[in-house]
């Protein structure tokens, strides 16, 4: 079963090392513990073969939103919702069960300081034209 684990991060609460300058709510010792837990989980799912792909996304301010209305393209900059959390990255995992996917997703630090969304990949077999 393949799942996408979407990490919605609140960088003012917890931040990956590349965004440490944004985090002011987690003490350095706690930050170190979170990073260790994150690293251990990443190693575990890499070694088990459950991790297919992962990537961190750049800051929301670098994003573009594209909309086509009445055949006119509009491109706007930056984050668009007034929210503290933003989509920070993803994991694509292949696991034996939904329970295992939930276990992996719940161990990400962002499940404690942001939101981790777990979504199965859609089965599009048979939809080819």
Image (tube, rainbow, N blue to C red):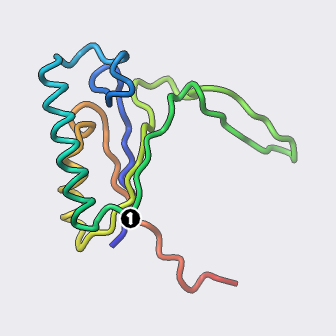
Q: Quadrant of residue 34?
A: top left
Q: On the rendered image, what quadrant is the C terminus found in?
A: bottom right
Instruction: Report which residue position mark 1 lands on.
Output: 120
Front residue of this view, candidates 77 and 42: 42
Q: On the rendered image, what quadrant is the N terminus found in?
A: bottom left
Task: Identify the residue at horizontal 38%, vertical 27% (top origin).
Answer: 18
Q: Residue furthest right?
A: 71
Q: In which quarter of the image is residue 33?
A: top left
Task: Identify the residue at horizontal 21%, vertical 34% (top origin).
Answer: 35
Q: Quadrant of residue 120?
A: bottom left
Front residue of this view, candidates 97 and 50: 50
Identify whether 50 is placed above or below 83.
Answer: below
Locate residue 29 relative to residue 61 in the image: left or right: left
Q: Where is residue 7 in the image (x, y as percent from the top left)?
A: 36, 42
Identify whether 73 is placed above or below 33.
Answer: below
Task: Identify the residue at horizontal 22%, vertical 43% (top origin).
Answer: 39
Task: Identify the residue at horizontal 71%, vertical 40% (top origin).
Answer: 66
Q: Position of residue 87 (x, y in %)?
A: 45, 38
SS for dot 1: strand
Q: Position of residue 28 (x, y in %)?
A: 17, 18
Locate residue 120 relative to residue 97 in the image: left or right: right
Locate residue 80 relative to residue 102 in the image: left or right: right
């Amino acid at each position: 079963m393949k799942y996408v684990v979407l990490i919605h991060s609140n960088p003012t609460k917890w931040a990956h090392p590349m965004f440490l300058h944004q985090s002011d709510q987690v003490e350095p010792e706690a930050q170190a513990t979170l990073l260790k837990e994150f690293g251990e989980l990443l190693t575990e799912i890499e070694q088990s073969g459950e991790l297919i792909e992962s990537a961190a996304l750049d800051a929301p301010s670098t994003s573009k939103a594209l909309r086509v209305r009445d055949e006119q393209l509009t491109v706007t900059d930056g984050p668009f919702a007034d929210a503290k959390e933003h989509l920070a990255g993803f994991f694509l995992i292949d696991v034996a069960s939904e329970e295992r996917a939930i276990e992996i997703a719940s161990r990400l630090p962002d499940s404690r300081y942001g939101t981790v969304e777990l979504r199965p990949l859609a089965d599009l077999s048979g939809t080819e034209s």
